[in-house]
Image (spheres, helix red, strand yellow):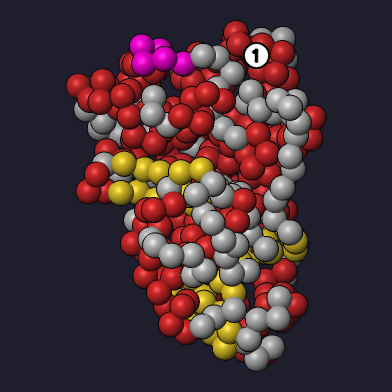
Amino acid sequence: MDNLIAIEGVKRTIFGRGAVNTIGEECSLLKAKSALFVIDKGLFNTKVFFKIKESLDSTGIETHIYPEITPEPSPELADRGAEIARQKGVDCILAVGGGSTLDVGKAIGVLATNTGKAEDYIGLDLVKNPGLPTIMVPTTAGTGSEVTFTAVFTMRERKKKGGINSRYLYPTVAVLDPELTIGLPPDVTAYTGMDALTHAIESYTSLKANFLSEIISFKAIELIVKNIIDAFRNGDDIHTREEMLKGSYMAGLGLAMAGVGAVHALAYPLGAFFDIPHGIANSVMLPYVVRYNLKSSEEKFSKIAGAMGINNSVERLPEYIFNLIKELRLPCTLNELEVPREDIDKMAEAAILVERPIKNNPRPVDIDSIKRIYEDAFEGM
């Protein structure tokens, strides 16, 4: 039974320039008469908001706005949204924004039809009943949340991060419009792009990788590496934005099928203890975990090196990634993020508890190896 592969995912994807104009029609196809419109605070009352609202209005969808979503969301944001969804009796959830907003939207969808609060469902397969239909509209090329079964939350008072992981969180519809990512600030382009690259590399080298996920994850690596610098330098290049959105989407598909590894496990404490955004936390840890993992899956890492133009020199891959991060003007070490070095033990103890990514890592990881990787991340390359 261990060799069986189950493939699940988003039911329907609309991709392309102008795809955002189909949102009202997609709601109608779901037989929805009303929707909870979950949106980033920063996008509320912008052109993106009004364009989507116009699409909803054109098909007669009654819209209730929930514009309170902030980065690295707390579970209470999902709880409040679910209460509104129940009170208004909405038929579907529409989430528009970055990964945090999409995660909250997915969680609201299941909370609206299940008892309890978001924090009650943090773990694996704890959600009992299917949720409301959800439509996910990413405005960054990064998290891939529009196709995954996870919603991640930060419990700041307890200095902890965790995710609701359930097949009932797979979105019903993903609408990917590269025009929504035009003009994304360079720093956001950089760290969301590196988040997607992390998903692609970790799912490709995952112990749970399979014949399909490997093809998808590797193509995501190629797309992101080829386009991330140009997207960073020129936010108005629609072709580059389109290719990055494809890469992010495919990285999300690979993640959903094969999972992630130690980069994510070591990144979680950075967010929980120091409120470092998830994309930046993944980015800063990536080269050091890749260096640790090299010998465990040398053939796959050699192919990744080839995709990055480092043929016949897999040992240079961690340094290449490090220099890519530097070129994107992102933090390359934990020192740059002002993480206290004396907290290594505390971080390692938290990271080892992120059980699924730890078990999924291509090279066995224990508390001592985690401490060494964190030490490396202070030193740099």
Q: Is most of the magenta stretch helix, strand or loop? A: helix
User: Which residue is denoted by mark 1 in the rendering?
Assistant: 297
Residue drawn 39% across the image and 36% down it: 268
Residue drawn 64% across the image and 42% down it: 256
Is residue 299 placed above or below 78 in the rendered structure? above
Name the spot of residue 146 as percent of width and height, x first: 61, 56
Q: Secondary structure at mark 1?
A: loop
Q: Is 209 a magenta residue? A: no
Is residue 379 placed above or below 56 in the rendered structure? above
Name the spot of residue 294 as percent of width and height, x first: 58, 12
Name the spot of residue 34 as percent of width and height, x first: 58, 84
Q: Which residues are magenta?
A: 365-369
Number of dots carrying numbers: 1
Q: Nearer the viewer, residue 164 or 161?
A: 164
Residue drawn 60% across the image and 8% down it: 295
Is residue 88 placed above or below 114 in the rendered structure? below
Amino acid type for the residue under numbered disc 1: Ser
Q: Nearer the viewer, residue 134 or 344?
A: 134
Quarter occupied by residue 172: bottom right
Tell me the quadrant of the picture where the C terminus can be found.
Answer: top left
Q: Nearer the viewer, residue 22 or 63?
A: 63
Name the spot of residue 314 as percent of width and height, x first: 64, 12
